[in-house]
Image (cartoon, grey):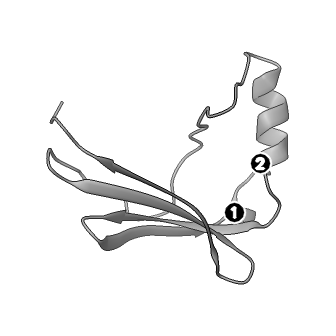
Amino acid sequence: WSSDVCSSDLKVNDQVRQQGRIDAMLFSVPQLITFLSGIFTLSPGDLIFTGTPPGVAPIQAGDRLQGRLYGGSGSLISSLEVGVVSDV
């Protein structure tokens, strides 16, 4: 975890659907990692899903999702893009 991460967003098909600040979370990232590590083993590459900022809406097969993390200066730190392959 890097304390440089300040905000995140989620795009669906190139449209920003959700945005949020990390400091608006109820528990800090280190607190979450400490708590969860006491319940099960966390490994490099594991993702922790904690909830979501406003903007939840359905997705469907063929949609492209892009999650991004930004630093304090607004610079992009990390990005992950996935395609939805099936409706469940």
Q: Is residue 76 left or right of residue 58?
A: right
Q: Which image quadrant for residue 84?
A: top left
Residue at image location 51% in from the left, 53% down from the top: 52
Residue at image location 78% in from the left, 36% down from the top: 33
Q: Position of residue 65 (x, y in %)?
A: 33, 55
Q: Secondary structure at mark 2?
A: helix
The answer to the question of whether label 1 and label 2 lie on touching residues, with beta carbons closer than 8 A, is yes
Residue extending furthest toward the bottom: 73
Label 2: which residue? 29
Crowd tier of the residue under label 1, counting other residues whose Cα lies within 10 Å: few below 14, some 14–19, many 20 or above: some
Name the residue type under label 2.
Answer: Val
Q: Position of residue 17 (x, y in %)?
A: 36, 68
Q: Is residue 41 above or below residue 76?
A: above
* Viewer can see residue 57: no
Q: Which image quadrant for residue 6?
A: bottom right
Q: Which image quadrant for residue 36?
A: top right
